Amino acid sequence: MPHTLSMRAVVLRTTEDLVVQDVPKPPLAPDEVMVRVTDCGICGSDIRYLHGENPWAQHTLGEMRENPRNIIPGHEVCGIVDEVGKDADPSLLGKRVAVLCFRTDESCYWCRIGERHLCPNTQHMGHGAGWGDQEYYYGGMAEFVAVWADHVYPLPDHVSSTNATLLDALGVAVHATELSRLKPGESALVIGTGVLGLLAVQTLKAYGSGDVICSDVSDSHLEIGRRLGADHTVNVRTEDVKEVVLDATKGFGARVIIDTVGRPLAETLPILARGGRLVTLAVHDRAEEFNRLLLAGEKSVLTSANFKYEEFPIAMDLLSSGRVKAEPLITHRFPIDQAVEAFSVADDKETSGAIKVVINP
């Protein structure tokens, strides 16, 4: 199919300056395919880019970095392969695919030891990272995006493209669960019931956890958590998390805590059981004080960054098999020309009730 030379795209020109405009269509390298985007989710990191943060550098490298101009956001991408490069698999043409949205350099220390997700030279769609100087940093919130051919995954017929936009976030939940070293039957607490928290609840259950408790400030999110498998829920505005966790675990505490919001360690360590593992998905640029005695009993504190390549197919299997459900998390859909409004809805979840907002180019 012939392509136009320009396309509609969401462009983050600079902090707080988000527009929808025509941009040049990206070039297609020999080892790439051109994906006609049908669905692209708005991630919490996209909101943080809008407000001037660089969450990839913060979470992966522990650095505070400025962002380049003209980022086209979007890394939760699904679409249809519209064109294939000369070195790409021609059988991909016309396939409905999900996108593994980052590629690493394969030569650094972390890549050589199998920890590609920590590569400092990552090229990340929609993040502006690793590309050098460009006029536009292409991501999935556009009519088309060029993707490495070995990073697209054909979708089963029964998995909708809209639901599959959650595969990137589900990969993050899988990685956090793997890091937690969850043993069958172990109790777990999930802090925060946004997209990652609700996916973590389901992933923990799929991995064979015992009771899963989730906490949040939103009764509606907690209700979804219960529907998706949480055994106990805690509204932290009206209930004491420690009391609920200790009661549910017969006084032992949670063996696994997955923290999606970054609560102070002084709050979370007292409810972590001896030998337990706390995995946090959110790190903040702030000082913390806590009594080191809270670490007694071989408690572990880990941060989780992104996911490994091999965890993306695991996420696909969880979604395809129905062990993880995406549909209850998708609350809003917008055409691309209403993307600025879509970001506003995603940014003000308390008012809008949004969980996952999807843009349909």
Image (spheres, grey):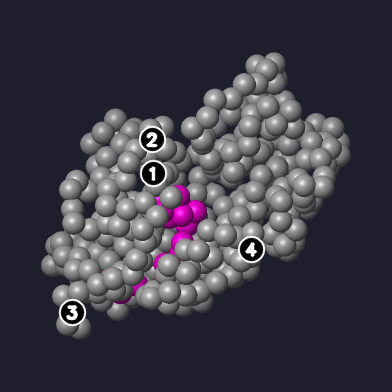
Query: How far separated are the C-alphas under marks 2 and 3?
Result: 38 Å
Mark linked to residue 64? 2
Kind of residue indicated by mark 4 = Thr
Q: Nearer the viewer, mark 2 or mark 3?
A: 2
Seen at 50% across and 49% down, the residue is 172
Ranked by sequence position, the earlier of labels 4 and 3 is 3
Q: Which residue is mark 4?
A: 351
Q: Which residue is mark 3?
A: 4
Estimate the x, y position of residue 128 in percent, counting from the top left.
Answer: 29, 50
Seen at 25% across and 72% down, the residue is 22
Extent of the magenta region = 34-50
Nearer to the camera, 152 or 358: 358
Q: Could you tell me which secondary element the residue under label 3 belongs to?
A: loop
Asked if marks 1 and 4 touch (Cβ < 8 Å), the reply is no
Q: Could you tell me which secondary element the residue under label 4 belongs to?
A: helix
Residue 176 picture quarter? top right
Estimate the x, y position of residue 86 in percent, counting from the top left.
Answer: 13, 67
Label 2 Cα crowd, 10 Å radius (few <14 / some 14-19 / many 20+): some
Q: Nearer the viewer, mark 4 or mark 2?
A: 4
